Image (cartoon, coloured by chain):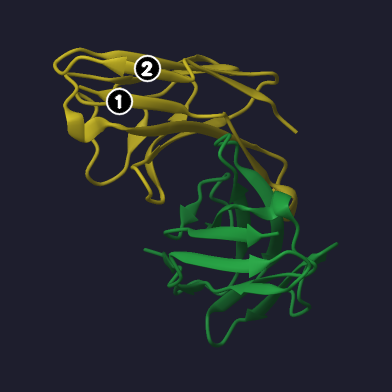
Amino acid sequence: SAVISQKPSRDICQRGTSLTIQCQVDSQVTMMFWYRQQPGQSLTLIATANQGSEATYESGFVIDKFPISRPNLTFSTLTVSNMSPEDSSIYLCSTSTGQGWNTEAFFGQGTRLTVV
Amino acid sequence: AQTVTQSQPEMSVQEAETVTLSCTYDTSESDYYLFWYKQPPSRQMILVIRQEAYKQQNATENRFSVNFQKAAKSFSLKISDSQLGDAAMYFCAYRSVGSYGKLTFGQGTILTVHP
């Protein structure tokens, strides 16, 4: 299993500024995932972060807007840059452990971001 | 690409009664994994139950069971003896074999449990 500590849990930010969200895992993991959950909506994958390489972004998400760092096997950050009210969402990090059928995903508690 | 659809934005149930949440998906893959996650107001995602497409037997976890219809690409969740603590947003999710934990989620169903 894996326990993920995500912070901040919530923040209110001014438009045009940036916020960096941190996720710390209590064990070494290969992949980390960042999701966005817009108000009342589903989780949408932003990018996959593998240690030692650049993150892989999903369609509709770009590195300039959502730069990700993955400096080691237990830590990752997501920055939401030049924020606008449309960026108001919950952002969650996730990882997985195990292989094949036994692969299980674990999630941080999310960061509720409000842009004013 | 795979898609997951939950057609019930909201559902409600009386305490101790049974409720079924619907989920359909679209994929061209023959083997994959399906999940139901619960997200209470705390925002913590909690795994409720999972099913491997290769296995025909429906998964069961205590009061939670699924009806997996592979040909129809349907994966519904049945909650028996509903409890107040079951109130949450429920997400159906799909994972490809070998995707290292990357999930595709449905839109979610808000479940309200009435005492």
Residue appearing at x 31%, y 17% in the figure:
A12
Q: In the picture shown, does residue B66 fall above or below A101? A: below
Q: Are marks 1 and 2 in contact (CB under 8 Å)?
A: yes
Which image quadrant: the C terminus of chain B?
bottom right
Q: Amino acid at mark 1?
A: Thr
Element on which disc 2 rests:
strand
- Residue A92 x %, y %: 47, 32
Q: Colour of chain B?
A: green
Q: Can you see residue B95?
A: yes
On screen, residue B113 versus residue B15, left or right, reads left
- Residue at 30 percent of width and 25 percent of height: A114
Q: In the picture shown, does residue A91 fall above or below A21?
A: below
The reply to whether residue B93 is in sight is no
Q: Residue A93 in the image: x percent, y percent?
A: 50, 30
Q: Chain of mark 1?
A: A
Q: Which residue is mark 2?
A: A11
Colour seen for chain A: yellow
> What residue did someone put label 1 on?
A114
Q: Residue at x 75, y 50 (%)?
A: A102
Identity of the residue drawn at 35% across and 25% down = A113
